[in-house]
């Protein structure tokens, strides 16, 4: 037997035992990253550790679902050639009664740890489908909507059945729904992922690989994964066109994806120079604050 040990000592910033336990768990995970059979001492950073009451956070997420405090906002995806609105991506926000809008960066990782992300994710899927059906009906449009899935939701037993029920309930045409999954989600348990993706596409739903280029096995899995689209991670876009290495990587990915019959979306576009560079290399769709 071997042991990975996490050590945390008391500190004036700690108000509850659950915080101390969380620090010890965090330190233990760091010991595991060092190869295991090691110990790691939790260190407070110089700017101070944010105070999070984890018991309260879990309770507040439950209340948020019950009292419908979550909202969806939609970021447009623009056709690079025509400049026209092509589709939207559903993004969740938490309208807290006391703290106002809370970014998903703050609560999604926690919801994934507690398992509450499954209920939240199902609500997002249902609401996004309802909203896009209403939008298309009102405007005589044919927009599609992209919804991000969590690993727990994607690999959960019954996920495909829930997907079919959502389409039936909302009357959304399957081809107008796109699910976004990350590389790391697909690589973990690749055989099961392949099975789920094939079933999803058999329903007529499109599949997009989000944050492409940040995983470990992008190219080897891209040959076999049944997907329709890749989304270039914003970390490759933010230094364009000045950073020649990023530019070379982006150009190569676009060419490779097109040869594999895949659509390419660039995320995180924030200025005209980035858009022009990507248009030059025939990126298909644009998304980012430069547009909306």
Image (tube, rainbow, N blue to C red):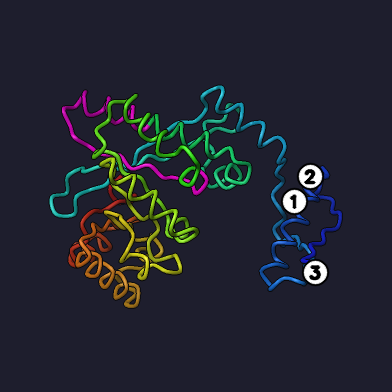
Q: Determine the secondary structure under disc 3.
A: loop
Q: Which residues are magenta?
A: 128-152
Q: CA distance from mark 3 to mark 1?
A: 24 Å
Q: Nearer the viewer, residue 103 or 258?
A: 258
Tell me, yes or no, whether the highlighted magenta stretch contains residue 130. Answer: yes
Residue shown at the point (61%, 29%) measured from the top left? 62
Q: Determine the secondary structure under disc 2.
A: helix
Q: Nearer the viewer, residue 216 or 14?
A: 216
Q: Relative to residue 167, is residue 115 drawn left or right?
A: right
The percent position of residue 210, horizontal first and vertical second, equals 38, 55
Q: Relative to residue 29, is residue 72 drawn left or right?
A: left
* Position of the C terminus by quadrant: top left
Where is 74 relative to 218, above or below? above
**Total marks drawn?**
3
Q: Nearer the viewer, residue 260 or 157?
A: 157
| Res. 270 visible in picture | no
* Number of residues whose C-alpha sits closer than 10 Å to that of mark 2, classed few (under 14), some (14–19) or many (20 or more): some
Q: Which mark is residue 22?
A: 1
Residue shown at the point (30%, 55%) measured from the top left? 227
């Amino acid at each position: 037997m071997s042991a990975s040990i996490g050590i945390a000592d008391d500190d004036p910033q700690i108000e509850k035992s659950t915080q101390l336990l969380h620090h010890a768990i965090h330190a233990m995970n760091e010991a595991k990253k060092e190869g295991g059979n090691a110990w790691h001492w939790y260190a407070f950073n110089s700017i101070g550790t944010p105070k999070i009451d984890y018991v309260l956070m879990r309770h507040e997420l439950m209340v948020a679902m019950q009292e419908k405090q979550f909202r969806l906002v939609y970021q447009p995806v623009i056709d690079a050639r025509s400049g026209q609105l092509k589709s939207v991506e559903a993004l969740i926000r938490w309208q807290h009664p006391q703290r106002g809008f809370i970014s998903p960066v703050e609560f999604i990782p926690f919801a994934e740890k507690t398992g509450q992300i499954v209920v939240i994710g199902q609500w997002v899927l249902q609401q996004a489908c309802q909203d896009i059906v209403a939008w298309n009906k009102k405007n005589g449009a044919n927009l599609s909507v992209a919804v991000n899935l969590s690993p727990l939701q994607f690999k959960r037993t019954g996920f495909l059945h829930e997907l079919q029920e959502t389409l039936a309930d909302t009357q959304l045409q399957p081809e107008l729904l796109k699910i976004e999954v990350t590389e790391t989600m697909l690589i973990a348990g690749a055989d099961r992922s392949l099975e789920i993706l094939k079933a999803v596409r058999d329903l007529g739903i499109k599949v997009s690989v989000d944050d492409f280029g940040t995983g470990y096995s992008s190219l080897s899995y891209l040959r076999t994964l049944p997907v329709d689209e890749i989304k270039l991670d914003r970390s490759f876009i933010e230094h364009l066109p000045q950073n020649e290495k990023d530019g070379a990587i982006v150009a190569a990915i676009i060419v490779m994806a097109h040869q594999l019959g895949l659509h390419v979306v660039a995320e995180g576009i924030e200025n005209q120079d980035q858009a022009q560079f990507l248009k030059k290399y025939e990126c298909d769709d644009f998304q980012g604050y430069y547009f909306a």
